[in-house]
Amino acid sequence: MKRALAVLSIVTAAVITLAASRAFEARTAQDPPDPDAVARWMATIAPGEQHELLKQLEGEWDTEMNVGGMVSAGTCTSRTVLGGRFIMSEFGGDMMGQPWENISFLGFDRFKNKFIGCQMSTMGTNLLTMEGLLDQTGRVITLFGAMDEPMTGEHDKTVKYVFRFVDANNYVFEVHDLGIVPGETKVVEVKYTRKVE
């Protein structure tokens, strides 16, 4: 008897859930969207002034990368994509004597009000993501993200990424390992110099 009541309760709950779901779907299909909600969404769609700042990264660049004192040269091509919403950068060079390719995206999320980015490379099968803010000078973007470290077995350790806009023809990208305490946390520095035509 108890088992029969338990089965009946489960069946009843399933029927009520299904009926409520169908009623919600029918109401949603008939009701027009909330104009205020649509306006809030539309306000986050178009590129803004932060995207204009990112356009400084467009172009052809010569690079000098310093990883733990090992310096190597490379090149980078950056362009706006998706209607100016993101900068896509394709980097080619070498790291620690190995050929290295990197593709990255940098943008600004107008809903979160944060700069966002991701990158992937031939030095791993992972995807790095990051988000952060522009400082008061308007020349430095600092982002944070989680990174795995196969050499040490660490997962999701916090890493800081910094873009420093020097002038129209130069900028610097830094990677900081915040687990290095005390001492200098910067483990990668890439200097970008615009190619002269």
Image: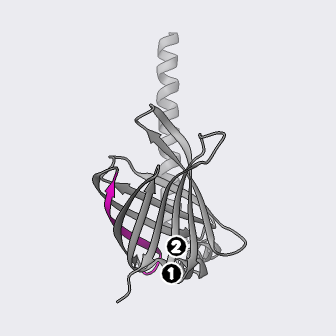
Q: Residue furthest bottom?
A: 197
* Nearest to the observer: residue 102 or residue 18: 102
Please say if 189 is above or below 170: above
Residue 33, by quadrant, is bottom right
Q: Kindly report the secondary structure that dominates the magenta region of the rendered protein.
A: strand
Disc on the earlier residue, 1 or 2: 1
Mark 1: few/some/many CA within 10 Å (<14, 14-19, 20+): some
Q: What residue would you read off at disc 1? A: 56
Give residue 14's mark. Answer: none
Instruction: Find residue 71 and report its image quarter.
Output: bottom left
At horizontal 43% and vertical 66% (from top left) the residue drawn is 105
Give the number of the disc on residue 171: 2
Viewer-side residue, 10 vs 185: 185
Stretch in magenta: 83-95
Left or right: where 60 falls relative to 56: left
Q: Nearer the viewer, residue 93 or 22?
A: 93
Image coordinates of residue 53 in percent, x first then y, are 56, 79
Q: Is residue 88 left or right of residue 164?
A: left
Is disc 1 placed on a helix, strand or loop?
helix
Q: Quick one: which residue is furthest to the top in this view?
A: 1
Q: Residues within 10 Å of mark 2 (few under 14, many from 20)?
A: many
Does 92 lie within the magenta span? yes
| Colour scheme | one colour
Image location of residue 195, percent across then percent down: 38, 82
Q: What residue do we see at 50% from left, 49% from top?
A: 21
- Vertical placement of 150 versus 72: above or below? above
